[in-house]
Image: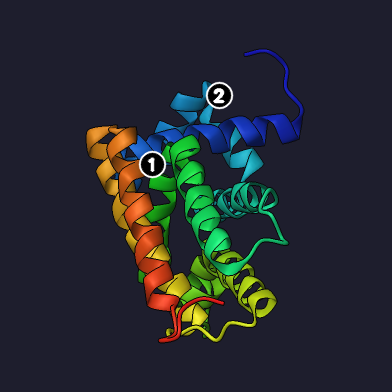
Amino acid sequence: MTYLSADERRRVIVDAAVRVIATEGLARATTRRIAEQAGVPLGTLHYCFRNKDELNLLILGRGRATMLAAFEELDRGAGFEVTVREVVATYWRWIRDHHGLHLALMELLMWAIRNKEAVVPGRDVWAEINAPLGGDLIDSALTAAAERDGLRTAVPVPELARFLIHRMDGLVFEFAETSDEASCERQTLLLADALVLLALPRQGLR
């Protein structure tokens, strides 16, 4: 293998771990299998990472970083309905463009729930791990847009954010099975419509 710096080796191994988890599942993502996929000796993996848990947490961190980068492009001056539609579209693009990573994240969130006392001892998995993977970003974007419009949503914004994430999680599985981008995008348009209607107070949007 070509010489790589320590940071580059870690990146290559994280890339390989994402591919293995996304395509073969977390149970098959042994350190030996990940090293094989990365094209590095097993000893190199153990040199770069204290244990597999550290590697798993780095993948979660990559998920947060790519999500933050995606949401940086949101128009922070738009009204509520436009923001809802752009948030849904942004979330969908993140899934589409990082689908293998998102599949790996789904597996790792279940790992975190099953091992919460080791991963986030005494804390809530949603608050510590899942919320930064979209929940906080969506909540803040919708809250700011509602405030700009002087809108008090019929359904509280945190509930709208959770509803959006739960629906998008289902879309991850559909896209994994069908690879039908057009069909999935149509579902995102329906989701945006539903969110706007759920948010509408009786007198309608201002």
Q: Secondary structure at mark 1?
A: helix
Q: Which mark is residue 92?
A: none
Image side of residue 126 versus residue 14, left or right? left
Q: Amino acid at mark 1?
A: Ile
Question: Which residue matches tag 2?
Answer: 40
Counting other residues with Cα less than 10 Å from the Cα at mark 2, is it few (<14), some (14-19), or many (20 or more)? some
Is residue 29 something one can see in this rendering? no
The one nearer the camera, 68 or 154, is 154
Residue pictured at 61% horizontal, 65% vertical = 137
Residue pictured at 49% horizontal, 56% vertical = 85
Quadrant of residue 144 within the rendered picture: bottom right
Pinpoint residue 157: horizontal percent, then vertical percent. 51, 79
Of all residues, the one furthest to the left in this rendering is 177
How many labels, in total?
A: 2
Residue pictured at 55% horizontal, 24% vertical = 40
Q: How is the image coloured?
A: rainbow
Q: Quadrant of the N terminus?
A: top right
Pinpoint residue 13: horizontal percent, then vertical percent. 56, 34
Pinpoint residue 6: horizontal percent, then vertical percent. 74, 33
Question: Which residue matches tag 1?
Answer: 21
**In the picture shown, does residue 205 fall above or below 87?**
below
Q: Nearer the observer, disc 1 or disc 2?
A: 1
Residue pictured at 36% horizontal, 42% vertical = 185
Q: Amino acid at mark 2?
A: Val
Counting other residues with Cα less than 10 Å from the Cα at mark 1, is it few (<14), some (14-19), or many (20 or more)? many
Alpha-carbon span between mark 1 and mark 2: 17 Å
